[in-house]
């Protein structure tokens, strides 16, 4: 059967995607596209990547049957794809190892990246330390405050962290700042984007590197259950763990795919980060996609308890999947995510990151409405150590 | 021939380059902008480039970012900036281009945007995050309203691309002088001069060539113009004057006028023919 979207023609997924960037970057994007098209078919490159993913990052990650949670909820079987067990504590390493290898084979010695929660920054610093590349990370000052642990981790890993004070001082502004750096230093620098966002070919590169999640879980669930799951659920910030989960199943029409965005304090409050659910089409960070914006096209500031979901745009392939109704997108609030965070910790002994806690919250909700013979797979995109302080504060607990 | 090219042609006859002056519409407050633009014109600016402030200006350095924040905080909207053009156009014939990132245009809708722009007398549009590959519909609608679409070329642009961009651009070609974002710089780099030399064979006889990013002093302008470019674009320098005098309107206007005058003088080539 034909893949719905194997490689985006002209950098587009339907009308989404594209390359809306300053002219200075156009040459760099075609250089990147050429390098990537060559390497994605290159057996040596793929072998190297597989080596690092298994020997260094600890793949494959387990697909764990969350039996206690399943029993407590009483409904569909809930499986967890344990990206929290990958090196660095999140799915981010799949992408950063791939792109760092790409940077290296392109002869770039300096790597820059943006980070929100700090998870992508940490994963970039890890991959670049392993592959001996110089790393500089842009991070909003607001995020540096709420994710102090990760700031120190990046510095331990020998990355330089630049404080971003412009705009809302969060993820979107650190992307702006990384793009400005790239425009200035494009001849020597590789921009390592952390999600399936940005101008083509980034969304396809990141999706391909993250697809290891979906391919592994497809094999694992087939082994354990002898069939494919009924529903896949993943959280959506920029959308990389979700895209990596969904992509290998796009042509398996019987498998429902659900992305969960951050509803923050509630959609009505206006304080959320639900671009697909509540945004409108627009152009941001080089791509045409769903964007949270006002009536004049100004990008809005977002809110989520999880820094990793706090982004006003979303990967263009998600906009496409929404448009053709191949995937559904819904939301979970801060409160619902925290409740799911507590439930999983208590019942399974797994402390999830707040980002996938949004996916868990929705999984629990629909598991109750499904039969015991049905199967849900939730991508547990990261572990929650980084969020312990934030959750304590939310609950009003003094540590 | 449309107004922008006519302006370049007249300047050429007088052996002058064009001074293209940029300010952010609505900075520091919307009601200031028409006076600021008039000061630029009084000082001698040949073409005005008025910015629509956008929340995420990735091609801009700190100076214009700050101007954008001031303008947005003062409630400036895209429609208001177009109205400012209309207000100036009631009194002056100087061509006015609008600089905007793509999202505000996209949000308003191409048809609505260009209809309003045309009604307000906008002569051309510069969209720094819209390369030619993404500009098909944009260009079609702009042509229908007879508004120039000014595209940019950069130091990294290959000669093959440059040829294509020259075919797409109208009004003039905007040559980005350096690797980087907007903002004043100490001097004109050798790279910039080489870039002008690289571009001229493609533009000469076809379309005027104007150079921007980092141009802020009369000697910069002179270097650009003596190297045969048709125009110099100055932005951050004016924005800094606005920033410094934002509490004192009269001084701001005087200083802008004086600055424009000095920069304009530098566009005048030797007058041996007179
Ligand atoms: C653990 C975790 N999950 C999810 C995300 C959201 O990113 P994406 O939607 O690209 O998977 C982040 C981002 O920092 C993260 O750290």
Image (cartoon, rainbow, N blue to C red):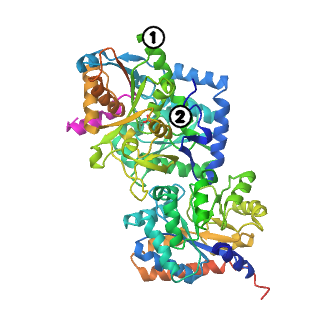
Residue A398 part of the magenta-drawn span: yes
Residue corresponding to mark 2:
A206
Residue A278 visible somewhere in the drawing: yes
Instruction: Tell me if residue B238 comes above or below residue A103 in the rendering.
Output: below
The segment highlighted magenta reads A378-399
Residue A129 visible somewhere in the drawing: no
Which callout, 1 or 2, points at the residue further toward the start of the chain? 2
Image depth: mark 1 or mark 2 in front: 1
Measuring from the top left, give residue A311's x and y in whole percent.
Answer: 41, 44
Residue B193 part of the magenta-drawn span: no
Q: Chain of mark 2?
A: A
Q: Which mark is residue A223?
A: 1
Disc 1: residue Cβ within 8 A of ligand 1's nearest atom: no
Q: Is residue B111 left or right of residue A368?
A: right
Q: Give the SS element for disc 2.
A: helix
Q: Chain of mark 1?
A: A
Q: Quadrant of the N terminus of chain B?
A: bottom right
Q: Are marks 1 and 2 in contact (CB under 8 Å)?
A: no
Q: Give the SS element for disc 1.
A: helix
Q: Which mark is residue B247?
A: none
Disc 2: residue Cβ within 8 A of ligand 1's nearest atom: yes
Cα separation, mark 1 vs mark 2, equals: 27 Å
Q: Quadrant of the C terminus of chain B?
A: bottom right
Please state which of residues B84 and B215 is positioned toward the viewer in this rendering: B84
Decide: few, some or many residues near mark 1? Use Cα within 10 Å; few <14, some 14-19, many ≥20.
Answer: few
Measuring from the top left, give residue A300's x and y in whole percent.
Answer: 38, 52
Q: Residue at x 63, y 53 (%)?
A: A24
């Amino acid at each position: 059967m034909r893949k719905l979207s194997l490689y985006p023609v002209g950098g587009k997924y339907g009308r989404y995607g594209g390359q809306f960037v300053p002219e200075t970057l156009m040459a760099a994007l075609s250089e990147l596209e050429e390098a990537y098209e060559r390497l994605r078919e290159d057996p040596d490159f793929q072998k190297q990547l597989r080596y690092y993913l298994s020997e260094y990052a600890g793949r494959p990650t387990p697909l764990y049957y969350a039996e206690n949670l399943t029993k407590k909820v009483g409904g569909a079987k809930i499986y967890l794809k344990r990206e929290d067990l990958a090196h660095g504590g999140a799915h981010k390493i799949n992408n950063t190892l791939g792109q760092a290898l790409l940077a290296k084979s392109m002869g770039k010695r300096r790597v820059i990246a943006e980070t929100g929660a700090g998870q992508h920054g940490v994963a970039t610093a890890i991959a670049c330390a392993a592959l001996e590349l110089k790393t500089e990370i842009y991070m909003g000052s607001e995020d540096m405050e709420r994710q102090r642990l990760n700031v120190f981790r990046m510095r331990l890993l020998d990355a330089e962290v630049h404080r971003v004070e412009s705009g809302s001082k969060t993820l979107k502004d650190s992307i702006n700042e990384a793009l400005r750096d790239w425009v200035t230093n494009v001849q020597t620098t590789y921009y390592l984007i952390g999600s399936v966002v940005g101008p083509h070919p980034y969304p396809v590169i990141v999706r391909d590197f993250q697809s290891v999640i979906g391919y592994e879980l497809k094999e694992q669930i087939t082994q354990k259950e002898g069939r494919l799951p009924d529903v896949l659920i993943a959280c959506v910030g920029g959308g990389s763990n979700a895209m990596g989960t969904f992509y290998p199943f796009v042509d398996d029409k019987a498998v429902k795919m659900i992305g969960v965005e951050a509803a923050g304090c509630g959609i009505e409050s206006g304080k959320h980060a639900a671009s697909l659910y509540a945004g409108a089409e627009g152009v941001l960070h080089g791509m045409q996609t769903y964007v949270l914006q006002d009536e004049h096209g100004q990008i809005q500031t977002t809110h989520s308890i999880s820094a990793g979901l706090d982004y006003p745009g979303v990967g263009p392939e998600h906009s496409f999947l929404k448009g053709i109704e191949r995937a559904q997108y819904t939301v979970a609030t801060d409160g619902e995510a925290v409740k799911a965070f507590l439930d999983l910790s208590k019942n399974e002994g797994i402390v999830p990151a707040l980002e996938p806690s949004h996916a868990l919250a929705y999984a629990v909700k629909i598991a109750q409405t499904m039969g015991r013979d049905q199967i849900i797979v939730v991508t547990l995109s990261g572990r929650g150590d980084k969020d312990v302080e934030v959750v304590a504060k939310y609950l009003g607990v003094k540590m | 021939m449309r107004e922008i090219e006519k302006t370049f042609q007249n300047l050429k006859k007088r052996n002058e380059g064009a001074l293209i002056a940029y300010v952010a519409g609505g900075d520091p407050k919307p009601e200031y902008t028409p006076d600021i633009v008039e000061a630029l014109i009084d000082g001698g600016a040949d073409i005005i480039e008025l910015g629509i402030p956008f929340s995420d200006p990735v091609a801009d350095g700190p100076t214009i970012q700050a101007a954008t924040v001031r303008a947005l905080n003062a409630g400036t909207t895209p429609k208001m900036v177009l109205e400012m053009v209309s207000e100036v156009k009631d009194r002056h014939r100087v061509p006015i281009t609008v600089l905007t990132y793509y999202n505000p245009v996209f949000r308003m809708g191409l048809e609505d945007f260009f209809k309003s722009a045309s009604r307000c007398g906008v002569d051309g549009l510069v969209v720094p995050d819209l390369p030619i590959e993404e500009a098909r519909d944009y260009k079609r609608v702009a042509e229908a309203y007879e508004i120039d679409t000014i595209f940019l070329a950069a130091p990294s642009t290959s000669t093959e691309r440059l040829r294509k961009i020259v075919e797409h651009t109208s009004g003039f070609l905007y040559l980005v002088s350096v690797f980087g974002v907007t903002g004043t710089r100490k001097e004109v780099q050798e790279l910039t001069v080489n870039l002008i030399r690289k571009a001229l064979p493609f533009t000469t006889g076809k379309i005027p060539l104007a150079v921007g990013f980092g141009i802020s002093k009369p000697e910069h302008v002179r270097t650009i113009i003596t190297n045969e470019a048709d125009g110099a674009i100055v932005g951050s320098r004016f924005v800094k004057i606005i920033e410094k005098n934002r509490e004192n309107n009269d001084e701001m206007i005087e200083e802008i006028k004086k600055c424009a005058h000095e920069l304009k003088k530098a566009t005048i080539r030797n007058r041996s023919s007179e």
